[in-house]
Amino acid sequence: MEGRGDLTMASISLQDLKRRLYDEAKAEKTKRFWGLYVHVAKLETLRAAYEIAKRHNGAPGIDGVTFAAIEAGGVEGWLVQLRDELVTRTYRPLRNRRVEIPKGGGKVRVLGIPATRDRVVQGALKLIMEPIFEADFCDGSYGYRPQRTAHEAVARVAQAIVSGKTRVIDLDLAAYFDTVRPDLLLGKVARRVQDPEILHVLRLMLKASGKRGVPQGGVISPLLANIYLTEVDAMLERAKEVTREGQRTRVEYARYADALVILVDGYRRHAWLLKAVDRRLREEFAKLDLRLNEERSQRKGASGATEVGVARRRVGRLLAPGLRGAGARGAFTAMASISTTSSGFTRPLTITSVFVG
């Protein structure tokens, strides 16, 4: 990268760049990447981000500019102007438009809808940053990741129950997206991204969302939310390894965004693991300054039937953010009769039942 007024455009295709970034990040776990901003500001990246945003056909932001209006005025000129703002460092994200979505119990979920121009810039950042952090994400994380589905999270939980992990830790985070601390988040990004321009734009975007949190509705928000919780996943991976006995693991987990289920071996001599893992989870959440939703969080370790029942309900809650529509219901039907044998009992785990109604 040259002076603040110039960007040297590298002659590498976007797909090749993403593969190279992923391979380098996978090979060098402590590598910090620089010179990324040049690729964010390339027209090729912005065009790709625009096409992705257009396919999702989201609502306009606070400025009211729609995709139809952009198409009418000429997409290429619009993208060139956006590129020029990024190159000259004059780009400033607009304030997100707040939309309230009703939830159960009279509560609402507040979405932060970025302007179309900001959605495209967020998409460009995501295209460049995601391969780096994908190399760091753990196997038990499924939410909003490429080539990973909520159906696979169901299969992971179900397989854990089948293998005898019938003690369930059921934890929910209270208003997770609204309580992420920007300073901690940017610090985690900076461990991999040593590019002041990238960090500057991210800081501006987070500031446009408010003093705290990442907007539900932002293109880059799911990636940032996963980055924030990666160390929680890593702690659970370590718990799996330190309690392993040969090929048999005693702990399993699956996370879909802020929904998390941990399953612990049902044998009596492993009962201590339930409390140990629960305690370590709460310690990790405290480091992140996140609060648990105590009303929905619970630890179950009574009879096997109780544990399987809790697990069944938890599977439904785990998938609620990511599974909507007939396709999801069809996947449940295909997995409808998993039998669980543990502690001397056999009980069918009918996954379809968690989504009925």
Image (cartoon, grey):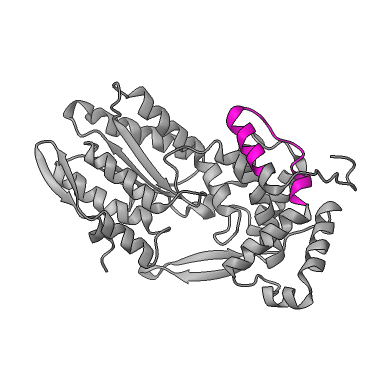
Quarter of the image where one finds residue 74: bottom right
Q: Is residue 233 visible?
A: yes
**In this rendering, is residue 10 above or below 80?**
above
Residue 106 in the image: x percent, y percent? 39, 70
Q: Is 231 placed left or right of 160 in the picture?
A: right
Residue 238 in the image: x percent, y percent? 41, 28
Q: Relative to the observer, which residue lies in front, 152 or 294? A: 152
Q: Residue furthest top?
A: 246
**In this rendering, is residue 284 above or below 291?**
above
Q: Relative to the observer, which residue lies in front, 51 or 167? A: 51
Residue 246 in the image: x percent, y percent? 30, 21
Q: Which residues are magenta?
A: 18-41
Q: Residue at x 9, y 37 (%)?
A: 344
Q: Residue at x 53, y 51 (%)?
A: 179
Q: Residue at x 33, y 53 (%)?
A: 296
**Residue 262 is inside the magenta segment:** no
Q: Relative to the observer, which residue lies in front, 195 or 211? A: 195
Q: Is 259 placed left or right of 201 in the picture?
A: left
Quadrant containing the N terminus is: top right
Q: Residue at x 58, y 46 (%)?
A: 181
